[in-house]
Amino acid sequence: MSGALARRLAAEALGTGFLVATVVGSGIMAETLTKDTGLALLGNTLPTGAILVVLITILGPISGAHFNPAVTLVFALKRDLRPQETGLYMLAQIIGGIAGTFAAHLMFALPMLETSLKVRTGGAQWFAEWVATFGLVVTILAGLRFARSSVPWLVGLYITAAYWFTASTSFANPAIVIARSLTNTFSGIRPADAPAFIVAQLVGAICGLGLAGWLLAQSDETAIGREAQL
């Protein structure tokens, strides 16, 4: 493994770890401070959106700041990653995410290893995960085309919004699902419910790639037409 690839994998693991620690830790803090579920969700939402802006800004130049196997799959399908890199990225994200859950537990004096009992299942939630991941991929790809420097903010704001307009609170990330299945706190998901979420996310990501490819091709044709008129 080259030094450059090792640094990229470390960035993916570190970023996913901090993202999960923020999701799980802010959920624990919110649940501790209030019994109002809506207020607790807000306390979980804002730190998640904020940390995404930070992490994508500082780690994006190193690894691309995927922090998400569904996003990595999209870039693999675009031929921006080789198969070996794809597998290593996904492994680093999953390991980093699990480490983030453990870190959150340790910070709040909870058992480091536990499994969630929180039920998150049903067609509405699966469709919500499809929608959340579909929208995330379109946001990333369109952002990279039209407003590359704004991508950290676009992703952070999208996830902040998606927490509230999706029935599932927008996991939109298989590594996050796995990590959150290991916490029996506000942000948890039963391990038995995780596979359906992951399938919905991967399908949503592929559909998002398909639509974004068509939309962006249309924008390219428009730009070429304008140049021809000039």
Image (cartoon, rainbow, N blue to C red):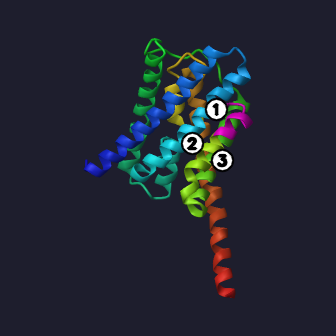
Q: Judge whether residue 172 can be spotted in this image.
A: no
Q: Judge whether residue 89 can be spotted in this image.
A: yes
Q: CA distance from mark 1 to mark 2?
A: 23 Å
* Label 2 element class: helix
Labels 1, 2: front one: 1
Between discs 1 and 3, the one toward the N terminus? 1
- Left or right position of 25 against 98: right
Tally of numbered tags: 3
Q: In the image, what residue occupies the spot 26% across and 49% down? A: 3
Q: Which residue is mark 2?
A: 202
Highlighted magenta segment, given as a residue range:
160-170
Q: Which residue is mark 3?
A: 135
Q: CA distance from mark 3 to mark 2?
A: 12 Å
- Callout 1: few (<14), some (14-19), or many (20+) C-alpha neighbours within 10 Å? many
- Callout 2: few (<14), some (14-19), or many (20+) C-alpha neighbours within 10 Å? many
Between discs 1 and 2, the one toward the N terminus? 1
Labels 3, 2: front one: 3
* Label 3 element class: helix
Q: In the image, what residue occupies the spot 44% across and 15% down? A: 113
Q: Which residue is mark 1?
A: 45
Percent of width and height locating residue 230 = 67, 88
- Callout 3: few (<14), some (14-19), or many (20+) C-alpha neighbours within 10 Å? many
Percent of width and height locating residue 99 = 41, 27
Amino acid type assigned to the residue bearing label 2 in the image: Leu
